[in-house]
């Protein structure tokens, strides 16, 4: 099994470099990379995924190779290098060295302060430890982290931002500069560390490769609060000083790194198990789509740095020239790891003594790319600064001057160097079986210059228990496990494996350490990509929609079919059988308009409802990021972490319909709407239109109020507005909420005024309009104030980002209307349940369905009245109330008075004699003279009312989320 070769390759681990200051040196940062000092400073990733920690106790032993496959013993110099590395620590992959501490330092294992002047620092990953803790360290070094990834899953990195008291998962340093964070998991990395992060994100769906039904804990290291406690030993496992402690990103349990390996590996998804959409129930063919597209994350979050996974973000984000060392005994070198880095001018910086051995410089260069291999297997090549930007630099690299072994660097040093792997006659390669669903096993074989892909397959199959007669049914797949994208490529049967290795190393040593080879079966699997396209003209047939898409998007009907049509909403769902065609349609639709209306395109997953466990009632989450200032955006981030991101939908990206279509076959689900009353009405209206197409036709709806008034949220006990409560606690409250019924009302607006036809210029009657009402409908002064507020918000929308400011504007508009008088009783006629009702002298008439109006005011009042029944939200009745003016409205909102009770009924007809301001659930307009009819709208809607019972303080709940994210942290 070529164990010696495995040690040399570092298990295929990722690269790395240094960042910030270390206990003994101050590296410099230059353009294109990070700096590196010899001999005692280096920093890198301590991979913090489930794959990194849990795989330590789940990895299977590799089947023994035959005697002829055993590699020869390493040369003496190589043995010496291995012995030196082993003497510095026995933790997985670490290379500890005793260093002198020059500032307060904490141990990354026990999180205690390191007393004295000496500590032990891993020269590759910057892991700091007490001497007494060395033998207990279980967290693997970054150089072996990629080899411990069970299933490669790329991260979904959002735009750079500032995050308080967060540590980089790669270099383990505090995030003091703008950094990336994953929108799906808890990964935080510096911008220049991102290329070295493991592709160890949560697996939230199945894509046809390595699908499995049993899910293990997905561990992520660090960024826990100082009060976090271990599930196993009950001791503190979090720290605000260092990257320490582990958290499962599915169930949320916390543990020390050493304790996490004894936690039962299978994850049950914790307290939220019944609300989470299990990953094995979601299928999405996502090969050609980025993670941002797969999870429907707004493209406004993407940056140009995300265009290419191989681009080092530091090159794009920093244009500084390399700094000059102030230490005359040191020099700074640019290090490139291959042709790709040269072409893009992406380099790392190392600081070395002006007179030093070649091997020490090679070692520093390797560690700057997070490679802990034997320096004798690599060499440095040099070229001039003028050659750096030549178009044919890649072709000239083979003829550049090569350094001789044992040479010494002196003052006449070239500005840039390329680190190359020395040619090898044979090499050990790890082959992973692609059909493995549990654990992580591989077969190691030795290949030479004549070894082809077919030869490798024939040699590996017997070791995996397969017959050679069927070797044609297998293929070898090369997988590049990048942090932002996992790329797969099938190797040709006659391709030379050793030559392929050399080509990858020549391109990038970092990419080589992030490359893995799988042997997979040639299963004929059909490609199915579902694309939601909205913004089309409503009320058309399937053929008409197909013709429009064929004309506008050059639709290929042999590859694309219309699987679902939502005619009333002007939307269709396309089923595409080709990845390239799906990607083309997605990108083209976003830049296409039909009838001056832009199209929307959303990639949606397929939910396998037959795989849902019993008692599972997933939560469908809708978030309006424009509500509540920046709180909507922060909640999107939080709910994607707490749930499966495939069940969280952003309403500004296609509206509620993509979410309802995704959940259409789930027999039981609930809904959480995060937004104002207008957002809730939007979702309820869409639910009413699509109800007949849902397997769960009456889902219950909860509210997280983010708007200004939030009257419906108040009535259902969800509060006056969101003020930063723990999102996990909100989900628990939704799970424990009570199901109640609520009336909804239909308002028919039939204007008598004629409008000019756009086709022939002839005056025609304006067609009737229908709107839905949940809370209240106002005419007169109430609607006039709403209209003034609406106009002010349209003029300066950026200023309306807080409830306090919004209410201030509302008061200002009200003061301007105080001197205005309107005899509303002379301008309208009211009929209730076929009976004429005489109106008193009022300026405003309001129909209320819930006992809250104008941000919590009780307009009806609590006094007993024998003429009317006690109002309820499900009694099938509306209450009609009048107000005499702005002062009366202010008194009602102050609790000093109530409105004038006029009537109570279930059917209302209003006759407008003049144009009058009207508002329904806060949406105002001027209604021309005509008829308004208000009546009940179909079946009552199921709402969730927050329970009065206090949340149970069970031990499991306390432990599972003692480190719940506060939204004011995750929103930064």
Image (cartoon, rainbow, N blue to C red):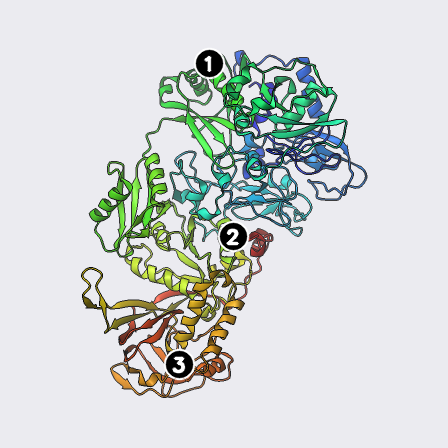
Q: Secondary structure at mark 3?
A: loop
The residues tagged by marks 2 and 3 sit, at their Cα atoms, a distance apart of 40 Å
Position of the N terminus by quadrant: top right
In the displayed structure, would residue 805 be above or below residue 195? below
**Tag 2 or tag 1, which sits nearer the N-term?**
1
* Total numbered labels: 3
Badge 3 is on which residue?
870
The residues tagged by marks 3 and 1 sit, at their Cα atoms, a distance apart of 86 Å
Near-viewer residue (626 or 519) = 626
User: Which residue shows up at 56% across the image and 52% down it?
Assistant: 970
Q: Secondary structure at mark 2?
A: helix
Badge 2 is on which residue?
638
Q: Nearer the viewer, mark 2 or mark 3?
A: 2
Q: Is residue 44 left or right of residue 470?
A: right
The image quadrant of residue 98 is top right
Task: Point out which mark residue 451 bears.
Answer: 1
Residue 148 point in image, percent of width and height: 55, 32
Local crowd size for mark 2, using a 10 Å CA cut-off: few (<14), some (14–19), many (≥20): many
Res 197 seen here: no
Residue 401 point in image, percent of width and height: 61, 15
Near-viewer residue (455 or 686) = 686
User: Which residue shows up at 62% across the image and 30% down it?
Assistant: 348
In the displayed structure, would residue 223 be above or below residue 144? below
Q: Is residue 350 left or right of residue 548?
A: right
Residue 256 point in image, percent of width and height: 64, 43
The image quadrant of residue 752 is bottom left
**Tag 1 or tag 3, which sits nearer the N-term?**
1
**Tag 3 or tag 2, which sits nearer the N-term?**
2
The residues tagged by marks 1 and 2 sit, at their Cα atoms, a distance apart of 49 Å
Local crowd size for mark 1, using a 10 Å CA cut-off: few (<14), some (14–19), many (≥20): some
């Amino acid at each position: 099994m070529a164990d010696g070769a495995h040690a040399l390759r570092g298990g295929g681990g990722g690269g790395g470099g240094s960042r910030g200051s270390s206990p003994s040196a101050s590296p410099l940062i230059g353009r294109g990379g990070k700096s590196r000092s010899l001999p005692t400073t280096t920093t890198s990733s301590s991979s913090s995924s489930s794959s990194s920690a849990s795989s330590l106790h789940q990895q299977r032993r590799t089947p023994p190779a035959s005697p002829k496959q055993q590699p020869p013993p390493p040369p003496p110099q190589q043995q010496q290098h291995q012995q030196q590395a082993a003497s510095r620590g026995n933790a997985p992959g670490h290379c500890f060295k005793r260093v002198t501490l020059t500032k307060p330092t904490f141990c990354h294992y026990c999180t205690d302060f390191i007393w004295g002047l000496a500590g032990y620092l891993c020269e590759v990953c910057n892991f700091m430890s007490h001497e007494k803790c060395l033998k207990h360290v279980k967290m693997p070094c970054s150089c072996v982290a990629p080899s411990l990834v069970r299933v490669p899953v790329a991260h979904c990195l959002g735009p750079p931002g500032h995050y308080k008291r967060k540590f980089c998962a790669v270099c383990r340093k505090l995030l003091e500069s703008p950094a990336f964070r994953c929108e799906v998991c808890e990964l935080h990395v510096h911008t220049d560390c991102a290329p070295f992060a493991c592709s160890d994100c949560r697996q939230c769906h199945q894509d046809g490769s390595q699908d499995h039904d049993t899910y293990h804990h997905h561990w992520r290291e660090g960024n826990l609060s100082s009060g976090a406690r271990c599930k196993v030993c009950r001791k503190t496992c979090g720290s605000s000083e260092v990257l320490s402690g582990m958290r499962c990103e599915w169930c949320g349990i916390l543990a020390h790194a050493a304790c996490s390996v004894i936690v039962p590996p299978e994850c049950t998804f914790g307290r939220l198990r019944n609300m989470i959409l299990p990953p094995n129930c979601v299928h999405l063919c996502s090969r050609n789509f980025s993670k941002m597209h797969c999870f429907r994350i707004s493209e406004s979050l993407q940056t140009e740095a995300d265009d290419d996974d191989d681009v080092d973000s530091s090159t794009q984000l920093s244009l500084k020239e390399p700094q000059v060392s102030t230490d005359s005994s040191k020099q700074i070198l640019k290090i490139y790891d291959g042709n790709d880095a040269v072409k893009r001018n992406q380099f790392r910086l190392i600081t070395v003594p002006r007179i030093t051995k070649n091997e020490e410089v090679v070692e520093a260069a390797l560690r700057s790319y997070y490679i802990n291999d034997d320096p004798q297997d690599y060499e440095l090549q040099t070229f001039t600064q003028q050659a750096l930007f030549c178009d044919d630099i890649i072709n000239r690299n083979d003829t550049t001057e090569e350094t001789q072994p044992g040479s010494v660097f002196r003052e006449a040093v070239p500005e840039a160097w390329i680190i190359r792997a020395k040619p090898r006659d044979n090499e050990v390669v790890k082959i992973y079986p692609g059909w493995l669903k549990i654990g992580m096993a591989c077969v190691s074989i030795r290949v030479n210059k004549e070894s082809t892909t077919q030869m490798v397959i024939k040699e590996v199959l017997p070791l995996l228990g397969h017959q050679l007669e069927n070797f044609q049914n297998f293929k070898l797949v090369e997988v590049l496990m990048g942090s932002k994208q996992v790329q797969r490529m099938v190797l040709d049967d006659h391709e030379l494996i050793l030559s392929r290795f050399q080509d990858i190393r020549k391109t990038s040593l970092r990419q080589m350490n992030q490359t893995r080879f799988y042997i997979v079966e040639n299963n004929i699997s059909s490609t199915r990509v579902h694309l939601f396209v909205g913004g089309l003209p409503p009320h058309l047939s399937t053929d008409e929609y197909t013709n429009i898409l064929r004309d506008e998007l050059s639709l290929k009907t042999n590859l694309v079919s219309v699987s679902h049509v939502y005619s009333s909403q002007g939307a269709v769902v396309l089923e595409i059988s080709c990845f390239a065609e799906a990607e083309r349609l997605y990108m083209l639709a976003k830049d296409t308009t039909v009838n001056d209306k832009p199209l929307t395109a959303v990639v949606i997953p397929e939910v396998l409802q037959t795989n849902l466990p019993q008692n599972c009632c997933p939560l469908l989450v809708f978030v309006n990021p424009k509500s509540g200032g920046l709180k909507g955006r922060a909640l999107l981030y939080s709910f994607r972490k707490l749930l499966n991101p495939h069940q969280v939908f952003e309403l500004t990206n296609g509206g509620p319909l993509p979410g309802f279509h995704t959940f259409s076959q789930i027999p039981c689900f609930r809904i959480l709407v995060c937004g104002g009353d207008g957002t809730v009405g939007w979702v309820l209206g869409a639910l009413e239109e699509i109800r007949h197409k849902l397997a769960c036709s009456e889902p219950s709806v909860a509210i997280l109020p983010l708007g200004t008034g939030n009257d419906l949220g108040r009535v259902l006990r969800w509060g006056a507005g969101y003020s930063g409560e723990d999102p996990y606690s909100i989900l628990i409250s939704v799970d424990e909420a009570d199901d109640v019924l609520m009336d909804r009302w239909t308002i028919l607006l039939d204007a008598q005024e004629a409008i000019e036809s756009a086709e022939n210029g002839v005056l025609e009657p304006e067609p009737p309009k229908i709107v839905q009402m949940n809370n209240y409908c106002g005419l007169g002064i109430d609607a006039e104030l709403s209209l003034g507020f609406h106009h002010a918000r349209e003029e300066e929308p950026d200023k309306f980002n807080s409830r306090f400011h919004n209410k201030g504007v509302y008061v200002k508009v009200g003061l301007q209307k105080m001197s205005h008088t309107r005899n509303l009783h002379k301008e309208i006629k009211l009929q209730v349940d076929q009976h004429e009702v005489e109106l008193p002298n009022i300026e405003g008439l309001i129909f209320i369905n819930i006992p809250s109006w104008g941000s919590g005011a009780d307009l009806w009042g609590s006094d007993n009245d024998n003429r009317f029944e006690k109002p309820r939200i499900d009694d099938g009745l509306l209450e009609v109330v009048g107000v005499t003016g702005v002062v009366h409205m202010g008194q009602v909102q102050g609790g000093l008075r109530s409105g004038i009770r006029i009537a109570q009924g279930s059917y209302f007809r209003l006759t407008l004699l003049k144009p009058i301001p009207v508002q329904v659930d806060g949406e105002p307009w001027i209604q021309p003279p005509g008829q308004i009819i208000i009546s009940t709208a179909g079946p009552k809607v199921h709402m969730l009312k927050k329970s009065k019972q206090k949340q149970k303080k069970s031990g499991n709940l306390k432990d599972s989320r003692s480190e719940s994210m506060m939204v004011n942290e995750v929103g930064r």
